[in-house]
Image (cartoon, rainbow, N blue to C red):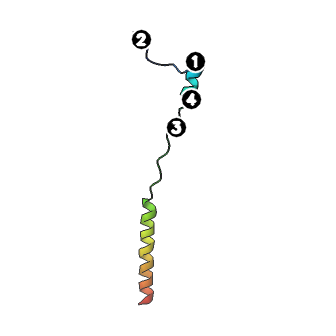
C-alpha cells in the first residue's frame, strides 16, 4: 500500500513549498454602510433646508 501523504519536513524543498503557501486575501470591504450613511446625511440636509426655508 502506497503512502500518498507528503511530509513537508521530509526534505528542504517540500518544506519551503509548504511554508511559502500564500495566505488567502481578505475580502474587500463592503460599501453599503457608506451608501446608507450618505443617504441619511442627504435626507437630514434636505429636511434642514426645508425647515429653514418655511
Nearest the eye: 17 or 36: 17
Q: Report which quarter residue 4 is drawn in.
A: top left
Q: Secondary structure beneath disc 2? A: loop
Q: Could you give the CA–CA distance between mark 2 and mark 4, rounded to whole angstroms? A: 25 Å
* Residue contact at pointers 1 and 4, CB within 8 angstroms: no
Tell me what residue is drawn at x 43 percent, y 13 percent: 3
Q: Secondary structure beneath disc 4? A: helix
Residue that label 1 marks: 11
Earlier-in-chain disc, 1 versus 2: 2
Earlier-in-chain disc, 2 versus 4: 2
Residue that label 2 marks: 2
Tell me what residue is drawn at x 41 percent, y 75 percent: 43
Please, is residue 24 above or below residue 49 in the view?
A: above
Asked whether, in this view, residue 51 is left or right of residue 23, the answer is: left
Residue that label 4 marks: 19
Asked whether, in this view, residue 7 is left or right of residue 1, the answer is: right
Nearest the eye: 7 or 47: 7
Tell me what residue is drawn at x 45 percent, y 58 percent: 31
Q: Residues within 10 Å of mark 2 (few under 14, many from 20)?
A: few
Disc number for residue 23: 3
Amino acid at each position: 500500500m502506497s503512502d500518498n501523504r507528503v511530509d513537508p519536513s521530509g526534505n528542504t524543498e517540500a518544506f519551503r513549498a509548504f511554508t511559502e503557501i500564500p495566505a488567502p486575501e481578505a475580502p474587500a470591504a463592503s460599501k453599503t454602510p457608506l451608501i446608507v450613511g450618505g443617504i441619511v446625511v442627504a435626507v437630514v440636509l434636505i429636511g434642514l433646508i426645508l425647515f429653514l426655508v418655511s
